[in-house]
């Protein structure tokens, strides 16, 4: 086989693959608001994309977001159902196109659900660890506050006994000063009495 013949054969294979890939997409008739259409047209024009390809990509992302919002139990059931339906549609397309097989294109919803469930379990574990750490820190803070309150409760009674000691010392000193003052004043008065006598 010459190089030209193998090249043409390669072109035929590429064409079949392209037709099979295109066949795996099912046309959908949808209506959207004029504002949304204007934005799609503007974005497609800005990035030099085919409008129908852009709609396909945007719709695919919106479906993933919608899928993520489903209840986990329901999400698992719907993922399995969607993948079965996608395989059924791919088989119908293959029969219509006269092809042996057409692989279902787009998102594999069961795999998407498994990855999401794994992420959710990981997030729950992280949240549980964070919650336990916060609870431990709060317990430690409460214990420290209680210890400070206990010390604070003990300090006033010690301070009161110290204040009483200081009060006793000062009353003793003032009594001593009073007696000294009285004893000093008494002789002066006697002397004054003797002068006048």
Image: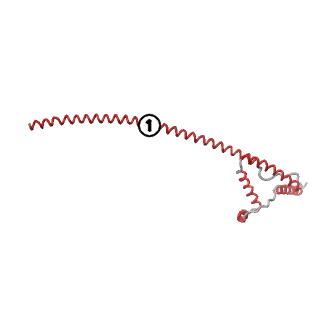
- Residue at label 1? 153
Pinpoint residue 126: horizontal percent, then vertical percent.
64, 43
Instruction: Give the side of residue 31 with respect to residue 139, left or right.
Output: right
Dividing the image into 4 quarters, which one contains the C terminus? top left
Coloring applied to the structure: secondary structure
Task: Reply above or below: 47 against 163.
Answer: below
Residue placed furthest toward the left: 197
Dividing the image into 4 quarters, which one contains the N terminus? bottom right
Task: Reply above or below: 167 against 76.
Answer: above
Residue occupying image coordinates x 55% and y 39%: 139
Residue occupying image coordinates x 45% and y 36%: 151
Q: Nearer the viewer, residue 22 or 138?
A: 138
Q: Nearer the viewer, residue 166 or 112?
A: 166
- Looking at the image, how many numbered discs can be counted on the residues? 1
Q: Which quadrant of the view contains residue 58?
A: bottom right
Residue occupying image coordinates x 80% and y 59%: 28
């Amino acid at each position: 086989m010459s190089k030209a013949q193998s090249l043409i054969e390669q072109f035929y294979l590429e064409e079949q693959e392209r037709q099979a890939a295109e066949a795996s997409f099912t046309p959908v008739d949808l209506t959207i608001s004029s504002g949304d259409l204007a934005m799609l047209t503007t974005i497609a024009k800005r990035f030099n994309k085919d409008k129908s390809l852009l709609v396909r990509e945007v719709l695919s992302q919106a479906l993933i977001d919608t899928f993520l919002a489903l209840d986990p139990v329901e999400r698992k059931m719907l993922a399995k159902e969607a993948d079965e339906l996608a395989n059924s549609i791919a088989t119908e397309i293959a029969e219509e196109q006269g092809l042996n097989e057409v692989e279902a294109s787009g998102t594999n919803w069961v795999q998407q659900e498994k990855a999401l469930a794994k992420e959710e379990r990981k997030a729950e574990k992280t949240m549980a660890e964070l919650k336990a750490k916060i609870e431990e820190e709060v317990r430690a803070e409460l214990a420290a506050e209680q210890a400070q309150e206990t010390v604070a409760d003990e300090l006033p009674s010690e301070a009161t006994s110290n204040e009483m000691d200081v009060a006793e010392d000062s009353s003793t000193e003032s009594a001593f000063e009073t007696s000294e003052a009285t004893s000093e004043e008494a002789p002066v008065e006697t002397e004054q009495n003797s002068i006048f006598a």
